[in-house]
Image (cartoon, rainbow, N blue to C red):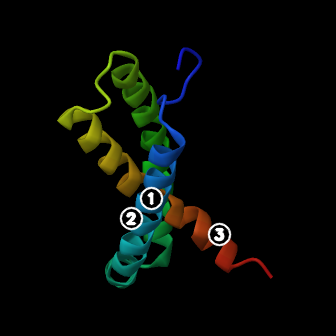
Amino acid sequence: MASGGLGLSEAAIGAHTAFRALTSILVIFAYAPLQRRLGTVRTYQLSLFIWPFTIMFLPALNFLARHGQSDSLLFKTLLVTFFFVWSFASLGLREWNLFDP
């Protein structure tokens, strides 16, 4: 954990990966109404605008994990929020791939 990471077991990493996949699916369902309301370009711009904020979660989560707070409500709330923000920000990356020939 000194050089990064959250110090999770393999089982916890697997559970987080599965939960991350579920959040991605939920965000994909929310994409269509959002895209209809904002348009493709604005949705893309919004997702790319949010992308840098995703990175801000990582040091906060690492700090909490280093100080033994990985079971705290704050840690779990930040982690769930991180997964949803990361999933939404990733829409911009997926959007880009839709236009590749």
* Kind of residue indicated by mark 2: Thr
Q: Nearer the viewer, residue 4 or 70?
A: 70
Q: Kindly state the secondary structure of the residue where label 2 is placed.
A: helix
Image spot of residue 68 (x, y percent): 32, 19
Please tell me which residue lies in front, 72 or 79.
72
Q: Is residue 28 left or right of residue 91?
A: left
Task: Check the image and report above or below for 3 versus 52.
Answer: above
Give whichever of discs 2 and 3 has the lower sequence position. 2
- In terms of image quadrants, where is residue 76? top left
Q: Which residue is mark 2?
A: 23
Residue 44 x, y percent position in the rendering: 50, 66
Q: Are marks 1 and 2 in contact (CB under 8 Å)?
A: yes
Q: What residue is disc 3 on?
A: 96
What residue appears at the point 76 percent right and 77 percent down from the top-left corner? 100
Residue 37 sits in quarter: bottom left
Mark 2 and mark 3 in contact? Answer it, CB < 8 Å.
Answer: no
Assign a secondary structure to mark 3.
Answer: helix
Residue 87 in the image: x percent, y percent? 45, 60
Query: Image quarter for residue 36?
Result: bottom left
Give amino acid for label 1: Arg
Residue 65 at least partly seen: yes
Of the image marks 1 and 3, the number of the one nearer the N terminus: 1
